[in-house]
Image (tube, rainbow, N blue to C red):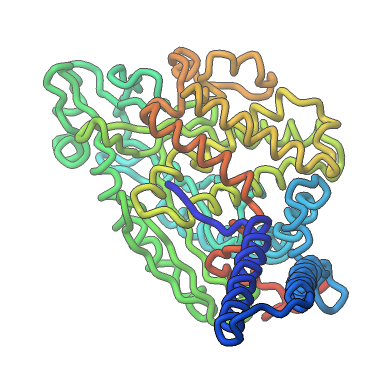
């Protein structure tokens, strides 16, 4: 996970010394040749004067190079070069971050609003088609509503608003009782559970079609478990049938396609045909089947590479997180930098992983996942006075967040906010949790990673922040221009 970058503070003096040494060698060679031809040396001081001329020329070249390296960019704009030369200066680092944020990170509120509205219109029609008037007899069904989750809806998405996550709640058959049970073989990690039928359930014997399609026997426990793989295999064709019903009114404005990606992820793709979708931004919508757990928490199909074949469900807290963000926003000063800090932390992570190979990059982003960064960010918000999040403290708060991440990596611990042991004392009364979640043991989000991997990530995170100016200059694949000024007249007014 090493990276080499050119240190200009060493390069230019070193280059000057090399050139001076070559000039001296050339001068001595010429003097030696003259001496060998004439048989004696010129008694005047012409050699000394020549050396002085060489030194003067190279000194002028050195200062000439340094002068142009530190000049502002043309057109009166504040160039990036000066900020890079003043890398240790707090004001220069802030200017660098602000410039990079405006160029690469900031979302256009207009484009984001248009995109969310179009996704909401399509998804609401799709889930209504899959809704049944009552619970199904021996199959699953859409409940008829959906929940918007993820960074695009929480306003800390980085780059372009082209990806949305939607939870689609499902209905179980009438009479089926499933008990969520904490997966006891996985202590300390993110919360996972299984959904089990009661022992010797009569319902499973009466509804063999559903049992054979969705349930798998667990011999040691003597119960049947709802299989997430079977639910996903049912969900994809069900979503296809619903999309086929509602697609006609939308196809005049955008092309729609549904695909099954990695880890059985159902992806809805919207490719615009006209200006109805502002700025012609192609969008991907991840449809996630979810089962209600109670108190606005949900169980979502997942996998654990350490326990293949286990029927595991992850606990999601969308409503709790939205309420918590709203509560924190009400406490922070107007125009606070808290969202910008989280966006820039994600960008620091992406810049730090851009030169890694595929395996190292996957581990880097696995340790510093978006949920991990958000958890550390929320904990920092709880431990910092609201006035400390004013816009002028942007660099200080970003440094605090990266420092807390590094310390957590070195200690191999980042507690889940809702299951961290101390989370109950941090959360406001408006954030309620299901009984199952309250009974879970404290959870460490980095439990699945080795201490050696976490130590390497901590070292690289320190390096990334120290050399952020060089990583920015190295460049990264150009993102879309976020729709600014390309196809929509409204964006120019922002």
Q: Is residue 303 above or below residue 77?
A: above
User: Residue 109 versus residue 39: which sits nearer the camera?
Assistant: 39
- Relative to 92, is 135 on the left or the right? left
Q: Position of residue 214 (x, y in %)?
A: 22, 39
User: Residue 140 versus residue 259: which sits nearer the camera?
Assistant: 259
Residue 65 in view (yes/no): no
Find the residue positioned furthest to the front. 39
Residue 287 in view (yes/no): yes
Find the residue positioned furthest to the left. 219
Which residue: 50% across, 55% down? 4
Which residue: 27% across, 36% down? 305
Q: Quadrant of residue 241?
A: bottom left
Image quarter where the C terminus lies is bottom right
Number of residue marks: 0
Q: Is residue 477 above or below residue 275?
A: above
User: Residue 399 versus residue 244: which sits nearer the camera?
Assistant: 399
Q: Is residue 480 above or below residue 140?
A: below
- Relative to 394, is 471 on the left or the right? left
Q: Position of residue 321 (x, y in %)?
A: 61, 34
Q: Quadrant of residue 52?
A: bottom right
Which residue: 43% across, 52% down? 287
Q: Is residue 95 above or below residue 301?
A: below
User: Residue 200 versus residue 440: which sits nearer the camera?
Assistant: 440
Q: Position of residue 226 (x, y in %)?
A: 26, 33
Which residue: 84% across, 71% down? 77
């Amino acid at each position: 996970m090493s990276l080499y970058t050119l240190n200009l503070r060493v390069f230019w003096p070193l280059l000057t010394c090399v050139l001076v040494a070559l000039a001296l060698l050339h001068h001595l060679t010429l003097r030696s040749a003259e001496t060998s031809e004439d048989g004696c040396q010129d008694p005047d001081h012409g050699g000394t004067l020549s050396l002085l001329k060489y030194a003067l020329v190279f000194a002028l070249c050195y200062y000439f190079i340094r002068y142009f390296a530190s000049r502002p960019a043309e057109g009166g704009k504040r160039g990036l070069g000066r900020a890079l030369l003043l890398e240790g200066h707090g004001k220069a680092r802030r200017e660098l971050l602000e410039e990079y944020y405006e160029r690469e990170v900031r979302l256009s509120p207009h484009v984001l609003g248009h995109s969310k509205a179009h996704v909401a219109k399509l998804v609401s029609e799709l889930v209504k088609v899959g809704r049944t008037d009552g619970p199904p007899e021996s199959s699953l069904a859409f409940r008829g509503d959906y929940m918007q989750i993820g960074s695009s809806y929480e306003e800390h998405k980085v780059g372009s608003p082209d990806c949305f996550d939607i939870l689609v709640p499902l209905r179980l058959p009438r009479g089926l009782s499933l008990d969520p049970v904490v997966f006891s073989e996985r202590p300390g990690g993110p919360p996972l559970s299984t959904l089990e039928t009661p022992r010797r359930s009569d319902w499973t014997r009466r509804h063999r079609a559903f049992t054979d399609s969705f349930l798998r026997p667990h011999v040691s426990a003597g119960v049947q478990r709802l299989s997430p793989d079977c639910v996903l295999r049912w969900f994809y064709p069900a979503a296809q049938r619903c999309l086929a019903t509602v697609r006609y009114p939308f196809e005049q404005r955008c092309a729609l396609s549904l695909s099954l990606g990695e880890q059985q992820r159902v992806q809805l793709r919207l490719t615009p045909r006209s200006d109805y979708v502002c700025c012609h931004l192609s969008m991907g919508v991840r449809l996630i089947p979810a089962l209600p757990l109670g108190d606005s928490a949900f169980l979502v199909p997942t996998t654990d590479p350490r326990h293949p074949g286990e029927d595991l469900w992850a606990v999601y807290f969308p409503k709790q997180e939205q309420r918590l963000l709203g509560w924190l926003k009400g406490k922070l000063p107007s125009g606070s930098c808290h969202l910008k800090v989280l966006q820039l932390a994600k960008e620091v992570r992406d810049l730090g992983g851009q030169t890694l190979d595929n395996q190292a990059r996957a581990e880097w982003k696995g340790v510093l996942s978006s949920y991990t960064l958000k958890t550390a960010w929320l904990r920092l918000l709880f431990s910092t006075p609201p006035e400390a999040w004013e816009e002028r403290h942007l660099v200080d708060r970003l440094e605090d967040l990266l420092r807390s991440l590094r310390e957590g990596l070195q200690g191999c611990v980042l507690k889940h906010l809702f299951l961290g042991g101390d989370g109950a004392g941090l959360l406001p009364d408006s954030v309620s949790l299901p009984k199952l979640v309250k009974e879970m043991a404290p959870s460490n989000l980095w439990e699945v990673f080795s201490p050696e991997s976490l130590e390497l990530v901590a070292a690289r995170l320190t390096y990334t922040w120290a050399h952020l100016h060089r990583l920015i200059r190295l460049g990264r694949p150009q993102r879309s221009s976020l729709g600014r000024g390309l196809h929509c007249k409204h964006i120019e007014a922002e």
